[in-house]
Amino acid sequence: MLGVAAFGVLFSGIFLHWYVFIKPTDADVFRAFGAPLSAAELPPGLAPPRGGPDGAALRSATLRHLAGRLVWDLEPASGASAAIDATTGEQLGQITPVDASLIAASVVKASPEDAKATLLNEYDGSYYEGDPPLPAYRVSFQRPKRVDVYVDAATGEVMAVVGTRERITLIFGAELHYLKFGPLRLTKYTTLRFIIMGALATAVLVSGVSGLFYGVPLLLRRRWRWMQGRLVQRSTLLRAAHHCLGVVAGVFVVGWGLSSYMMLWRPSMDPSPAETARVEGGFVDRDAYHIRVPEALATATAAGRGPVFMLRAQRLAGRPVYEAYQAPGVSTLVDGMSGRVLSPISDSLVRAIVAHYLGRDPRIKQITYLDHHDAYYRGSPYGRGYSFDGHRLPLPVYRVDLTSTALPSPLYIDAIRGRLTARVDGNYRVFRWLGSAIHNFDYPSLLERPRLWDLVVVIPALLGVLLSGSGLWLGFRHLIRKSQLGRDDTGGTPTTGPGAQLT
């Protein structure tokens, strides 16, 4: 049983090393918008909505195209998102399968005629991570490649893209490694899943320790026989190779097993919704926007970063702003009161954002502009540019180091959008160096050399798979041999001696 657990964990770890998140990339989201916004299609004096369909306060209101229709995508302070017609203010109902097919086809560059849209009212084998919204459409394509696109039925937002690589690394990597299959994939069974994973981590650890204690003495006792060339049977050769491999991989398995407990803990560096709300510093207030939507669109377009495909109205450090999304990873932030371009954000705005997050004036030790990931702002080594929770870590950012070690520090703030993208507290710092670094070998010096890092991770994992596999084979052979001897001792017919004459 211990060998089976070790084999499964190490085997899935290899696939998890190249795991691909199913969340849409910036390019996927960009393609889903369709045509850019045009000043000619905007109603004169268009302003952000006053509230949601039921009067709820809004965290953001996003102007965009939905299957060719101009809509406001509303994110209320509480409750589900909704979409309204930007011209009439009428709330839109559930999008049609045709709309979902058009959106999905634009994402994967396929023909809508090749799409098969299925409405999901419950999660399936791929669409479940993070409890995404339901109902949703699963739009499947067989050409030009096999891929499933999941589209929120309420807003038309692309929620997941699952192709061949995503499917393989999900099944043999994340699902096997983290036991995310069947009912265990649901959030309500997270505690049970963690208990089982803790037990399996203990089994792997015991397997590694017992392998060392069993393999090393045998190596010492038999070294003279091996040196004298007495290894003539294949089973003996396999046993010798297994013990030698155990010495090499045993320490690796033990270290990996110990760090597995830290990986189960895995605190997040992603800001919570409450933390993000503090950075925003309030809700969308139509009367606070002195600059209307057409003016903001013209200002962002004149900034020279290309046409605008989406315009989001929200708060940032208490002030009303527009975020104009113009290309994958390219945005322009416009002040909703003065019409000034705020991107890249100023030092004073960075300090205001930090003050809203902390709820007081910060004591900042250093603000550093980063155009690359550092030792903390790197996230999951599998996706490289994603956090462990699968959120994109954009660049460039400002790294803000505080003087107090009791507060989360450093903080990472998007230099273009002003969003708090990550924060490192004491728990995450411990996890980073005693969990992730040991478990994944994701030390900065290795991650700066991706090919070398791949070898450092995959080769020990392969050795562990071989160690576990050979151990399972030897163990099964031993059990079969004992069972055969047991049958002979309890009534089997002797094959030699006087008793054999009676047959």
Image: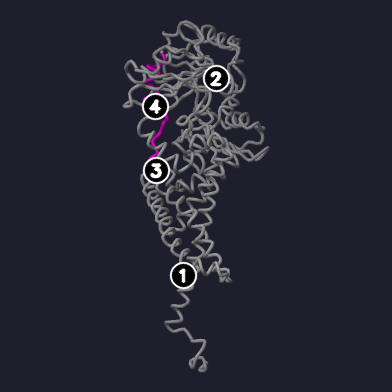
Of the numbered discs 4 and 1, the one sitting upstream in the chain is 4
Residue 448 vs residue 104, the one in the foreground = 448
Of the numbered discs 3 and 1, the one sitting upstream in the chain is 3
Q: Where is mark 2, residue-wise?
A: 64
Of the numbered discs 2 and 3, the one sitting upstream in the chain is 2
Question: Label 4's element?
Answer: helix
CA distance for labels 4 and 1? 54 Å
CA distance for labels 1 and 2? 66 Å
The residue type indicated by label 3 comes to Leu
The residue type indicated by label 1 comes to Leu
Determine which of the numbered discs, if any, sits on residue 309 in the image: none
The residue type indicated by label 4 comes to Pro
Q: Where is mark 3, residue-wise?
A: 264
Residue 424 is a magenta residue: no
Mark toward the viewer: 4 or 2: 4
Rendered position, 388 above or below 314:
below
Determine which of the numbered discs, if any, sits on residue 273 in the image: 4
Which of the image's four quarters has the N terminus? bottom left
Q: Where is mark 1, residue-wise?
A: 479
Q: Where does the magenta region start and end?
A: 261-284
Within-10-Å neighbours for mark 4: few <14, some 14–19, many 20+: few
Percent position of residue 328, x then y? 58, 24
The residue type indicated by label 2 comes to Arg
